[in-house]
Image: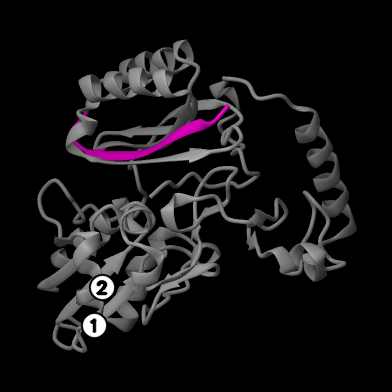
Amino acid sequence: MTWNVAALYHFTTLDDLPRLQTATKDACLNNNICGTLLIAPEGINGTIAGAADDLDRIMAFLDRTFGIGRGEIKYSTASEQPFMRMKVRLKREIVTLRAPEANPAKQVGKYVAPEDWNDLLDDPDLIVIDTRNIYETKIGMFDGAVDPKTQNFTDFKEYVAHNLDPQKNRKVAMYCTGGIRCEKASSYMLAKGFEDVYHLKGGILKYLETIPADQSKWRGSCFVFDRRVAVDHGLKESAHKICFGCRMPLEPEDLREPSYEPGVSCPHCYEGLSAEKAENLRMRHRQMADEKPVHDSAQDKKSDTGQTYVETG
């Protein structure tokens, strides 16, 4: 079976979140959908997967309920089930920045279509910032982009405060996986006095879907938050794996290193791994290997790739 995958988000004012959570969870389970959806007062965000007809039905439900057709949706496929279960979680923000002044419903930067992104990158007066985290930028970035080396998205505020100035950096462009973090980031920068702010509409995923590889300024693979780990041009699955011990994406050559043990360690974390933690990870890996995919939102504290974060954009 080929799994159809939809990455989506929409900023819209929501209330009565528990009711929305229950209705959405029931609809997903009734249509055999797996993945993660985050619901907050500011909107909905997530990535889900299922058979083609099932996904069509749940997307129609999400459009009726949340208006996601007015938001951002990217479709791709996976050769294996990309999520172990279905989770619908309530959050304070659908992408966490902890900056009330960043409100995409009020203001955002200028959207740049994937077809126009290459020309923008050629502007010598422009600074291009990758708003993703270090485990994502490790395996792919745009030519000439700045890596802020953040551990999580909330660190972006500190990066801006220490490295950017509205008077000096008059023209700033940003990009992220699917576009949602840039919505928040561009809104935040406008609130801080930056005037000429751009962001890639639909994010890296839309660019890789739209721009042929021979015309691309993207180098590497794009990290995604499911069991595929990363995708390449045309949104084809990459050869990357992930270290369940430290969450870092791994190149094929990393898998051949003696320090690589599936579910336990890799060249990035082996030296700092205690014997006790290694044994705990081995036990967990054995449990996950025996675990069958289920539709159960009771284990929200454990993500499907062994990671402790939930981000999709």
Q: Total number of numbered labels?
A: 2
| Residue 216 seen | no
> Helix or strand or loop: what does disc 1 sit on?
loop
- Which residue matches tag 1? 122
Q: Main secondary structure of the magenta part?
A: strand
Q: CA distance from mark 2 to mark 1?
A: 7 Å
- Which residue matches tag 2? 118
> Helix or strand or loop: what does disc 2 sit on?
helix
State if disc 1 and disc 2 touch (CB < 8 Å): yes
Q: Is residue 167 magenta?
A: no
> The magenta stretch spans which residues?
1-14
Look at label 2 and name its amino acid. Answer: Asn
Query: What residue is shown at x 53% (from left), y 39% (from top)?
Result: 78
Query: What residue is shown at x 47% (from left), y 73% (from top)?
Result: 149
| Residue 83 seen | yes
Query: What residue is shown at x 34% (from left), y 17% (from top)?
Result: 57
Look at label 1 and name its amino acid. Answer: Asp
Q: Which residue is more in the foreground, 296 or 152? A: 296
Q: Position of residue 12 (x, y in %)?
A: 18, 36
Whether residue 123 sits left or right of residue 308 in the image: it is left
Q: Kindly indicate the quadrant of the structure image that contains residue 93.
A: top left
Q: Which residue is more in the foreground, 45 or 103? A: 45
Using a 10 Å C-alpha cutoff, classify the residue at mark 2 as few (fewer than 14 neighbours), some (14 to 19) or many (20 or more).
Answer: some
Q: Quadrant of the N terminus?
A: top right
